[in-house]
Image (spheres, rainbow, N blue to C red):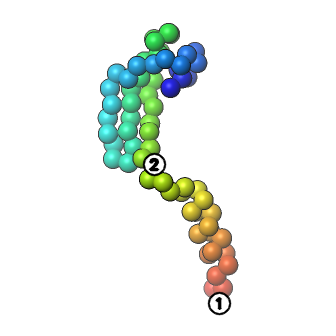
Amino acid sequence: MNCPKCGHNKTTVLNTCDKGRFTVRYRKCLRCKWRFTSKEMLNDGWNDREILKKIKKYLEDVDLK
């Protein structure tokens, strides 16, 4: 993971918290010592945006008379 402050690609994880569908990692840059968090979402193989687009299209096609 790159540091959002200096862009360095080496960081260390200080702590990890499981929040259900995502994980929060508290990180520290090894170059500038900036502390930041990252959030990792559970990837279950579904592309939520594409599914929502398809549902919206199907609903537009339904005749609601």
Residue 30 seen? yes
- Where does the image place residue 13, in percent across and percent down from the top left? 38, 23
Q: Earlier in the sequence, mark 1 or mark 2?
A: 2
Asked if 26 appears above or below 45 in the picture, the reply is above
Q: Is residue 48 left or right of residue 63?
A: left
Q: Is residue 12 left or right of residue 18?
A: right
- The residue that label 1 is drawn on is 65
Task: Answer with the quarter of the image where residue 53 lies.
Answer: bottom right
Asked if 59 appears above or below 4 in the picture, the reply is below
- Where does the image place residue 37, in percent across and percent down from the top left? 44, 28
Task: Answer with the quarter of the image where residue 63 lies.
Answer: bottom right
Residue for point 63% across, 85% down: 64
What is the count of numbered marks?
2
Residue for point 44% across, 53% down: 44
Whether pointer 1 and pointer 2 mark residues with C-beta atoms closer than 8 Å, the reply is no
- The residue that label 2 is drawn on is 43
**Dot 1: few (<14), some (14–19), or many (≥20) neighbours within 10 Å?**
few
